[in-house]
Amino acid sequence: MTLFAGHDLACRRGERLVFAGLSFRVAAGGALLLRGPNGSGKSSLLRCMAGLLTPIAGTETWDDRPIALDVDAHRSRLRYLGHQDAVKPALTVLENLALWQQLHGLRDAAAIRRALAGLGLDRLAELPARLLSAGQRRRVALARLVAAPAPLWLLDEPTTALDDDGVERFARMVGDHRAGGGLVVLSSHGDPGVAGEVLSLADFAPPPELSL
Amino acid sequence: MTAFLALVRRDLQLAMRQGSDAALVLIFYMLAVLLFPFGVGPEPNILARIATGVLWVTALLAALLALERLFVSEYEDGSLDQLALLPLPLSLVVLAKVLAHWLLTGLPLTLLAPFLAIALGMDEAGYPVLVLALALGTPTLSLIGGLGAALTLGARRGGALLALLVLPLYIPALIFGVAAVDASLVGLAAIPHLAILGALLLAAIPLCPWATAAALRQALE
């Protein structure tokens, strides 16, 4: 049974201690919802989970093995979606997704069609991404998760800019992923339409006198 | 390997679609070189004498033009996070991007140089070595420039800072590049100078991407 966990994590941004003593567990098929006010460290925690940021204390493990021991393996089993969509405006929607697959050593037209259909992008496939609205660009970014699958999804406010239909499609996508044994960690202020364990970042804010 | 080539192809494709800096670089190169006959005067002897240096220094400045954008657009639209998370090591990602930069700037500059050499009245005996020296030297410039671009990522006025950081590091390539051509013009062997240019390149290929990747990781933190 796949288990992604963090033990006693602490993270510092510049001179400020963002959170300390934070632990979490997500098992296969599970979802972890990060909640907390602005600046409470939701994005930092997601970046720590992705290995883009190194926590100053604590360890993260995958199946009880520290991820720091094999960073490459960890990278290949996760997909991270940050605040920015990382969609290239000069390429069409289809090209963006195909390129994303190639960068992961894949070539699977069926998965791209599935991804486009799942997010309602079928009719936009040939359109250059610069003509898309913010919500449509977000859908392309989400479609990448389906086009090149990986077990662990780390999503930073994935439903920003999405309309009701988009949120619904996103929820269905996450549902399918979890049903297939995938893990999801996501941060959100509104209702992302995903049920799961809630981790409140405010509980791990260090006392003010401890801030460096 | 597929991912590496896909990345090179992507950068070339993006450059073509966006009406790239590459054309700008070539036009700058041409204009800057052609300013010298106006500035120095149409005296053929003087022009021929300084031709090698002019061609190298302007090539170096032209290559610098497109460098600033190398990682900035990736950084701004969030692609850099994604590139750092690819199964491909970040240093190979850097190498792919630098290779694309060279194909778009260094290679055309190299091919254009002999034609500009005609305008400066350079002795044609120097053309083959000029092309060879630029072919060996410009990849080194791109590699060092990539490191500068990564270090200045996120800095205000990154472009000016980049030039200050990178130009001094260009000096060795400049010295041996010019020396190779001058040697061939006076009938001496150009091979030793070319060999040193090649050695510089061979040292830069593993070292620069490695250092650049470290700088990018720092920028992502």
Image (cartoon, coloured by chain):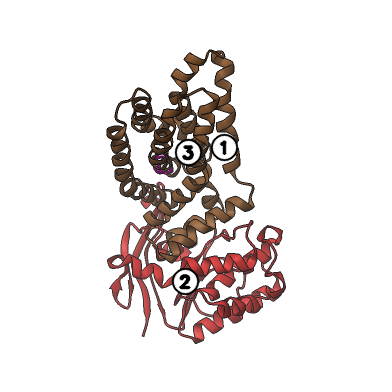
Colour assigned to chain A in the rendering is red
Q: Element type at marker 3? A: helix
Q: Are marks 3 and 2 in contact (CB under 8 Å)?
A: no
Three-letter code for the amino acid on which mark 2 is drawn: Leu
The residue that disc 1 covers is B26
Amino acid at the residue labelled 1 = Leu
Disc 3 residue crowd, few under 14, some 14–19, many 20+, Cα 10 Å = many
Instruction: Name which of mark 1 and mark 3 comes first in the sequence.
Output: 1
Question: In this orientation, does residue A140 appear?
Answer: yes
At a point 42% along the width and 33% down the height, the residue shown is B130
Which of the chains bears the disc numbered 3? B
Chain letter of mark 2 equals A
In the image, A137: left or right of A99?
Answer: right
* Chain letter, colour brown in render: B
Image vertical order of residue A179 relative to residue A44, above or below: below
Observer-nearest of A130 and A110: A110
Q: Which residues are magenta?
A: B143-147
Q: Tell me residue A162's x, y (percent).
A: 67, 68
Mark 1 or 3: in front is 3
Which type of secondary structure does the marked residue at label 1 adopt? helix
Please, which chain is the residue tagged with disc 1 on?
B
Place of residue A21 in the rendered image (x, y in percent of width and height, measured from the top left): 35, 64
Residue A188 image point, x, y percent: 56, 68
Q: Which residue is mark 2?
A: A199
Residue A207 found in image quarter: bottom left
Badge 2 marks a residue whose secondary structure is strand
